[in-house]
Amino acid sequence: MFENLSAKLDEAIRRISGEARLSEENISEALREVRRALLDADVNFQVTKKFVDDVKQRALGRDVIGSVTPGQMIVKIIYDELVSLMGNEKADIRMAPAGPTIIMLCGLQGSGKTTHAAKLANFFKGTGRQPMLVAADTYRPAAVDQLKTLGAQLDIPVFHIPGEDPVAIAEKSISEARRAGRNVIIIDTAGRLTIDEEMMEEVARIKQKTRPNEILFVVDAMIGQDAVTTAKAFHDRLDFDGVILTKLDGDTRGGAALSIRSVVNKPIKFVGLGEKLDALEPFYPDRMASRILGMGDVISLVEKAQEQFDEEQAKKLEEKFRRNQFTLDDFYEQLQQIKKMGSLRDLIGMLPGMDRALKGVEIDERAFVRLEAIITSMTREERQKPDIINGSRRRRIATGSGTQIQDVNRLLKQFEEMRKQMRQLTGGKMRDLARTMKLPMMPGRRR
């Protein structure tokens, strides 16, 4: 996400880093590259123009002229303007003070509305609330069945009345939610391949009948400038409250994320970063700006790790390390925790400077699969006592896992090195480290 934009902005900033001081000439030269980078990323032309003008005006201010670190100052100014462009701070869902909170999703067909209705329900379930999904898309084939399937996977009820009008379904869902003790209602409305009056009229009637606390516009980030055009059309009709930007993990130039906020003056509230039902995150403008400028996002990385952290498990692991009883079964459990945090490329991208350092380097997402295959090809005794794995056992494990003997040797060597290092963290040091960092152990990168 934003890889091309990040690289081009980095190049523009590098051009000015060697200058002794900021001047109108070198600022203008650098900002020409910034402008080109933003337009290449499919950022709206008017948004790009205002952004560049604002950066230039600030850079030429008296507080900047004469700075001994012009490159750092430009980075700070661009960072501040990116944050401002995307909304300054995280925008939360407005919850109802009493009764169920009603959230209505709208958008075009294919934007990911139904899937993200389920993701949003899963998000609220994770905060301790009791969500209910409402299948009000009665036009798209299998839309209701899709939502019911997703609801079943999450153990979240789905309200639908076969043959009923979508507006009536949405309206009746409120009394059903009260009866069932559900305090968050998420309404999945119908979309079309393009904007048409019939669709707009229906979502307007649903809004009128249900009086939602929040209307969220769901849009595919990969459609570029069309995302901004569509957002404006929906906003003019519905005056929605925020945006869910989907497929931000895909091959997208990211211009929609930088344009929508300025065009409709409504915040991006969530971003979809994958196909899994937990791949939905609140949108933080400051963290996104930091990632765009190659400064990483350590806060999000720690939060992801914290979700998987179990203090009781950390205590048990500490005891196992102290007694030299840490096994490959324990190592396997650590791998599962890391996998739950997301893709390896995304995790690495959250570390400051890593996107730049690993530019052109292919991150092998299959490394986890190989490690898992090797470990699961071992017998229980071998996982408990790796020291017994001799040459013949290594050949058998390699054959059973579809890998090479060198892969097995590498895993066993990394595992033993990790055990030696962790044995040194005694007397509660490992638990203190885990509490501080909230990070599970990472396997070595395959070379």
Image: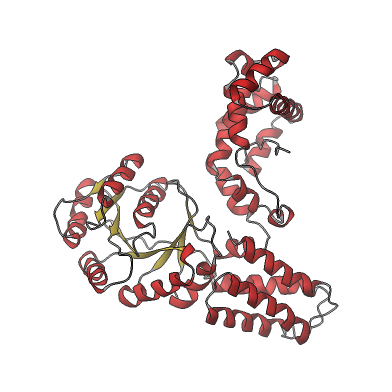
Say which residue appears at 31% left-offset and 73% top-offset. 238
Of 193 and 367, the residue lying toward us: 193
Q: Position of residue 121 (x, y in %)?
A: 36, 50
- Total marks shown come to 0
- Whether residue 378 is situated above or below residue 277 in the rendered picture: above
Q: Position of residue 418 (x, y in %)?
A: 73, 30
- Whether residue 12 is situated above or below residue 336 in the rendered picture: below
Q: Quadrant of residue 436?
A: top right
Q: Tell me if I can see residue 237 in this picture.
A: yes
Say which residue appears at 72% left-offset and 85% top-offset. 60
- Whether residue 80 is situated above or below residue 141 in the rendered picture: below
**Quick check: 21 left or right of 32?**
right
Instruction: Give the quarter of the figure containing the C terminus.
Output: top right
**Quick check: 317 left or right of 134?**
right
Of 302 and 365, the residue lying toward us: 365
Q: Quadrant of residue 408?
A: top right
Q: Quadrant of residue 112?
A: bottom left
Colour basis: secondary structure
Say which residue appears at 71% left-offset and 70% top-offset. 75
- Whether residue 93 is situated above or below residue 72 in the rendered picture: above
- Residue at the extreme left of the image, as rendered: 163
Q: Position of residue 333 (x, y in %)?
A: 57, 29
Q: Tell me if I can see residue 327 in this picture.
A: no
Of 105 and 146, the residue lying toward us: 146
**Quick check: 6 left or right of 263?**
right
Instruction: Give the quarter of the figure containing the N terminus.
Output: bottom right
Say which residue appears at 30% left-offset and 48% top-offset. 147
Q: Position of residue 297 (x, y in %)?
A: 63, 56
